[in-house]
Image (cartoon, grey):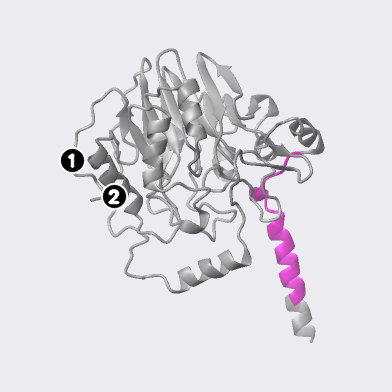
Amino acid sequence: MWIVGIISIVLVGGGSLLLRSPSFGKNPNKKAIEAFQSADNYNVAERQFKNSIPTKTTFTFSDFRKTTKKYITKNDSIPRTPDIEIPIDTNKWVQNDSTLWLSWLGHSSQFVNIEGVKVLIDPVFSMRCSPFQWAGSKRFHPVPHDTSTFSEIDAVVISHDHYDHLDTRTIKLLAHGVQRFIVPLGVGSHLEKWGVDSTKITELNWWESVDFKHITFHCTPARHFSGRRLSHQNQTLWSSWAITGNTHKLFYSGDTGYFEEFKTIGEKLGPFDIAVIQIGAYDSLWADIHMFPNEAIQTFKDVKAKKLLPVHWGTFNLALHNWKEPASWLKQIANRENIPVIFPKLNEQVFTTVPIEANKKEWFE
């Protein structure tokens, strides 16, 4: 009995320490919550943000049973991790501050240079997208860029607070060198806990915007959810983003299910030079909150973009599909419908003005 008692104490004590991990961040305080209550997308009674249309964001016991069965009976012949070495472009970026160019840094992380303003979007530079670096999904490839070169970044934009989009170690790395952090409502509380000065943080609700230098950052709707703990869901907002300069425009979907509001974004803020859209980690059980590739194509059309760059694939194993299926599926549709899609190598510099070679063989094929 005394052995059982000691084990119980260790487990309870260890669990308590884990739950205090700084990686969980910090939810909005009482003053912030009071400010949210006037927002149309905030449920005052439940103290949670909500989607603009009915959206399934929680698992039932039946869903859990179905998911467990899928993982137990999964087809091991489907390669969920790469059977090739994912290529990384080692060429140095050519500095061109008069136009719009970007570089995919894996999963949803991007470096964007829009008319000379340097922006990091959803930067995640840890080996795992998890609250703990000893467990969780591990990246398929190294971080493709020397992160020390990001010591002077104008702005960091965050779409929501899930671990594969908001990383504790990365924020601590960037906290002092970045001039401005632009995030959805409530996410600033996490950043402050990790050492970001509150004067550097701008929080926005859907359809709000902020001007920084000569660039406007528009917080636009998405269909998703938030939370870094199972017991603290939807206490911060999720969003897509439109980033617009004097002559150039970029749209980023963030994580989202498809919904008609993308058409409204296109009408109000489009057309865009490029749309960076989530295509991976989909499943019928969470179809409301992650798009399938065919829905990404529709989103591209809705926001009135000229080119499409897919993200949220090729870095972490977050679903049961083949690791490269999102890109292969997207390419099939794009070829059939003559959609200009860019599949860059990691760290490759992509200029939005450069024509796309049709039907060329991509690096993942």
The quadrant in which the N terminus is found is bottom right
Q: Nearer the viewer, residue 187 or 209?
A: 209
User: Which residue is drawn at the image coordinates 40% and 41% (left, top)?
Assistant: 296
In the depicted structure, whether residue 86 falls above or below residue 311: below
User: Which residue is drawn at the image coordinates 77% and 34% (left, top)?
Assistant: 37
Q: Pinpoint residue 208: horizontal percent, then vertical percent.
A: 61, 24
Q: Nearer the viewer, residue 361 or 358?
A: 358
Q: Nearer the viewer, residue 100 or 221?
A: 221
Residue 105 seen in the current view: no
Q: Pinpoint residue 172: horizontal percent, then vertical percent.
A: 59, 39
Magenta span has 11? yes
In the depicted structure, whether residue 18 falls above or below residue 246: below
Nearest to N terminus: mark 1 or mark 2: 2
| Magenta stretch secondary structure, dominant | helix
Q: Nearer the viewer, residue 129 or 143?
A: 129
Dot 1 corresponds to which residue?
360
Dot 2 corresponds to which residue?
328
Amino acid tagged 1: Lys
Q: Gap in Å between the C-alphas at discs 1 and 2?
A: 13 Å
User: Which residue is drawn at the image coordinates 32% and 45% (left, top)?
Assistant: 330
* Span shown in magenta: 8-28
Amino acid tagged 2: Ser
Mark 1 secondary-structure assignment: loop
User: Which residue is drawn at the image coordinates 46% and 69% (left, top)?
Assistant: 70
Q: Pinpoint residue 129: horizontal percent, then vertical percent.
A: 52, 51
